[in-house]
Each structure stands twice: as C-alpha cells, then as structure tokens.
C-alpha cells in the first residue's frame, strides 16, 4: 500500500513568487492536513481538509491556502512568498473524517521550500 | 488551545542505555502519537496511543489520559535510535495535531 506522497521534494523560489505543493494521501484516506516546520517555530498546523472542505485552520496569514479534490488529493498554495516561508512542509493523511474521532495520521516525506 | 510540552529537550546516552521521554498535554485529547523524524525530515510513526500501553520491540509507550501525560521508553539504545522524537496530540473535536518541541536523542557508540 503506497504511503503519503508529496511533490516536489525540493523547491527554490524567489521572494514575491507563488508556489503550489501537492499531496496524495494513502488510498482510502479522506482527511488531509498540512504542517509547516521551521527551526524557530517547530511543527505548526496549517489546515485540514475533508471531503473537499476545509474543516480546521491554523494561525497563518491568508497567503497560505489550500484545496482538496474529489479523489482526496490536496494542494497548498503560498502566494507572495517571503523569506520566512522557507520551511519543510509536511502533509498527513488520516482514515476517518469524523471531527469527534481522531485516527492515526501518517506523514509524507515533505517538501523543502527555500525562498531566496 | 491545547499545549504540548516534551522533556527533556536533549538527551545524550551511551549505546545500550535505556531512556524515557515525557510528553505533557494541557487538555483532554482524542489522539496522541509519537514520531521519530528521520534525517530527511519524514515523520515516522512510532505509536498511536490515546491511552494505555503499547510495545513494539525495544520501544514502548504509555499514555495516562486522566493525568495528561505520555511516556516513550527506549530500551537497549542503539546509535540508529538517534534523532528527534516528537509527541503530538489532537484536541477533542478537531482533526489536527499539536506538536511538542521535540526531544533530540543522541546515542553514542
């Protein structure tokens, strides 16, 4: 069974540009979450999607957005990149989508974004 | 929101030693997971343990939900156990993980 797949693995962008990252969850998983990891702030939750709807959102500016497709694949977009957006972006998928029942989350290998 | 604290932040041990990593959380949780982050950044699942005790080889974990803490035990440490260990918890009613700051474990030969 394939795991969570994130593309691309590495990305270098210029300040002011925008970027789109992709995440394919484990087959059958309908909940997809995104996290940002930086040395200063650690691992922080960005947002979570279930059935193409954003259900939870972290404390990030509106430049960070995402979406989920009918096949549960998800993309996140960062517009007007800043140097501080350089980070490892991790995607996680979970089997059950009920808000009252959390199930085990599995992570992809991440996309390492460098903004210059 | 929920707070997750891990201790110690750093742990240096000799190969063969045992170690205990602690995770405290500030509120009731629906999910508690332990991860090991590999050198390439991927989070490797160790335990999904909202409550109770589980064992997997040299690793075991215990979560006491009523007292809001979880422990990860590593016995007979090997150099390959080195790395950063994260604890993460999901608050009730939200499918998201709140991570601790991690424990950096270094096992010397």
Image (cartoon, coloured by chain):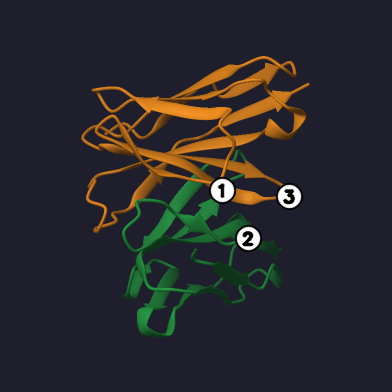
Residue at disc 2, secondary structure: loop
Q: Nearer the viewer, mark 2 or mark 1?
A: 1
Q: Residue furthest front?
A: A62
For the residues marked 2 and 1, what is the alpha-carbon distance in whole angstroms?
10 Å
**Can you tell which mark lies on residue A40?**
3
Q: Residue A25: in sight, yes or no?
A: yes
Q: Is residue A41 left or right of residue A106?
A: right
The image shows residue A62 at horizontal and vertical percentages of 56, 31
Q: Is residue A111 left or right of residue B88?
A: right
According to the picture, the residue beneath numbered tag 2 turns out to be B101
Residue at 59% x, 36% y: name it: A61
* Quarter in which the N terminus of chain A is drawn: top left
Residue at disc 3, secondary structure: loop
Residue at disc 1, secondary structure: strand
Q: Which chain is green?
A: B
Q: Is residue B52 above or below residue A113?
A: below
Identify the chain of the residue marked 1, using the numbered disc in the image: A
The image shows residue B62 at horizontal and vertical percentages of 40, 77
According to the picture, the residue beneath numbered tag 1 turns out to be A44
* Quarter in which the C terminus of chain A is drawn: top right
């Amino acid at each position: 069974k394939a795991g969570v797949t994130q593309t691309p693995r590495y990305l270098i962008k210029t300040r002011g540009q925008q970027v789109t990252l992709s995440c394919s969850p484990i087959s059958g998983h309908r909940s997809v979450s995104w996290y940002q990891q930086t040395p200063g702030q650690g691992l922080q939750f960005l947002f979570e999607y279930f059935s193409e709807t954003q259900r939870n959102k972290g404390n990030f500016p509106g430049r960070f957005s995402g979406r989920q497709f009918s096949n549960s694949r998800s993309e996140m977009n960062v517009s007007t990149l800043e140097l501080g957006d350089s980070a490892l972006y991790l995607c996680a998928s979970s089997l059950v989508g009920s808000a009252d029942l959390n199930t085990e989350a599995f992570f992809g290998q991440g996309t390492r974004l460098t903004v210059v | 929101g929920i707070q997750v604290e891990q201790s110690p932040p750093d742990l240096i041990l000799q190969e063969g030693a045992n170690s205990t990593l602690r995770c405290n959380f500030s509120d009731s949780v629906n999910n508690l997971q332990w991860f090991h982050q590999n050198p390439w950044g991927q989070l490797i699942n160790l335990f999904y343990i909202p409550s109770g005790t589980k064992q997997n080889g040299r690793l075991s974990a215990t979560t006491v939900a009523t007292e809001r803490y979880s422990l990860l035990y590593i016995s007979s440490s090997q150099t390959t156990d080195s790395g950063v260990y994260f604890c993460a918890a999901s608050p009730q009613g939200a499918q998201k993980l709140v991570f601790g700051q991690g424990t950096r474990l270094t096992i010397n030969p």
